[in-house]
Image (cartoon, rainbow, N blue to C red):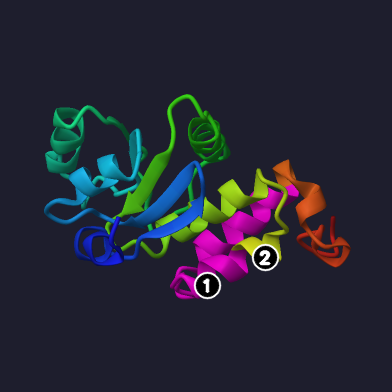
Amino acid sequence: MAAGEIAATLPLFHRVDENYVRGSQPLRGGIGTLKRLGVKTLVDLRSIYDHTDDIKAAAELAGLGYEWVPMSVWNPPSDDEANWFVSLVTNTSKGPFFVFCADGLNRIGEMTAIYRLAHNWTVEKALDEADELGFNPYYYTLRSYVWDYARKFHPSAVPANGRRVSSFE
């Protein structure tokens, strides 16, 4: 598939691995591009404030699966929500997945970093990748949550000097 077609219909498209691609919300023709790329399920991280049903309808019309996992740029997900997301996008029978949010930068950066932790990446490496792809430091609560999530569920991903939140632990 031509890179121009991908860029024109899927802004900020990035292949994370064979089962997970990410970007901002698809533009006109984007669902068809995803189908030609072999994507089976779209995972929508847009919040209740920027979510619409048009992408879901287009995905279902094209025979693709669709999951809405509402995320906020202001508040991180609960541990249960993050774990459910990881269980969804690591279920290869439903993938490959296209994971997106409205801007393709922050919610997707946070959740892709959490996905990377499940694939034995260090928290620093996962957040470095998110930063390279536009993760905005303004949303420090999302970044902080990636560290908290790593400490709770993937402690080996955290450097020894970062395993405690404070000296009072």
Residue 88 horizontal side relative to residue 9, left or right: right
Name the element at disc 2: helix
What percent of the width, then of the height, locates residue 147? 66, 58
Query: How far is the residue under mark 1 from the one under mark 2?
Result: 10 Å
Which image quarter is the N terminus in? bottom left
Which image quarter is the C terminus in? bottom right
Q: Quadrant of residue 42?
A: top left
Where does the magenta region start and end? 127-151
Tell me the number on the disc at residue 131.
1
User: Residue placed at 56% from the left, 63% from the top?
Assistant: 143
Q: Mark 2 and mark 1 in contact (Cβ < 8 Å)?
A: no
Question: In the rendered image, is residue 51 in sight?
Answer: no
What percent of the width, then of the height, locates residue 78? 52, 41
Camera-side residue of 109 and 161:
109
Disc 1 marks a residue whose amino acid type is Asp
What percent of the width, then of the height, locates residue 6? 27, 60
Of helix, strand and loop, which mostly describes the magenta segment?
A: helix
What percent of the width, then of the height, locates residue 86? 55, 37
User: Residue placed at 16% from the left, 56% from the top?
Assistant: 27
User: Residue placed at 27% from the left, 40% from the top?
Assistant: 35
Instruction: Tell me, yes or no, whether the highlighted magenta stretch contains residue 10.
Output: no
Camera-side residue of 52 and 56:
56
Tell me the number on the disc at residue 125.
2
